[in-house]
Amino acid sequence: MTQFNNGKVYHGSDAVQGGRLQGATAETDYFYFFCPNCPDKEMLRVLDHGVRHEQPDNPYDTKVGGPKSATGFVLALKVHCRKCGFTDFVKIGNLGWQGGKHQEALDSTV
């Protein structure tokens, strides 16, 4: 079984934090990240992925109400721009900020 990032330490840089990494869906339901360095929304390739964390419950279920999560999880992705060579890491999951407005997430210490 392979390890994410070949077992090397990783963390997303400032380029993917603070609202600088953006993305959207296109013709289907697939989500694409845009290179934070290139103009015109150059799409990043996902080179690697890994389950960073998984647990049977999600502590936010009781805090935010509504439908319950099937599990708690964090996925890590290694992304790369073919145009400029930018390579970085980003995480996505349901164990972090759980609602509200984007600015509130940026201001949050959660």
Image: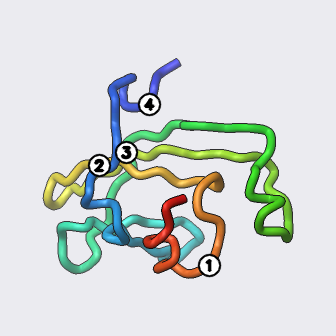
Name the residue type under label 2. Asp
The kind of secondary structure element at disc 3 is strand
Q: Nearer the viewer, residue 25 or 99?
A: 99
Q: Residue at x 47, y 50 (%)?
A: 91
The kind of secondary structure element at disc 1 is loop
The residue mark sitting in front, 1 or 2, is: 1
Name the residue type under label 1. Gly
The residue mark sitting in front, 1 or 3, is: 1
Mark 1 or mark 3: name the one nearer the start of the chain. Answer: 3
User: What distance separates the C-alpha of mark 1 from that of mark 4?
Assistant: 31 Å
Residue 4 - label: 4
**Which corner quadrant holds the C terminus?**
bottom right
Q: Nearer the viewer, residue 77 or 74?
A: 74
Count of marks, rendered view:
4
Q: Residue at x 53, y 54 (%)?
A: 92
Is residue 100 rendered to the left or right of residue 106?
Answer: right
Q: Residue at x 83, y 68 (%)?
A: 65
Kindly check if marks 3 and 4 are in contact, taking CB atoms under 8 A apart as contact. yes
User: What distance separates the C-alpha of mark 3 from that of mark 4?
Assistant: 9 Å
x and y, in percent, of residue 13 in the image: 27, 51
Mark 3 or mark 2: name the one nearer the start of the chain. Answer: 3
Q: Nearer the viewer, residue 22 or 48?
A: 22
Mark 1 or mark 2: name the one nearer the start of the chain. Answer: 2
Give the residue number, with chain letter if any, for mark 3.
Answer: 78
Q: Nearer the viewer, residue 59 or 10?
A: 59
Give the residue number, with chain letter if any, for mark 1.
Answer: 100
x and y, in percent, of residue 34 in the image: 33, 68
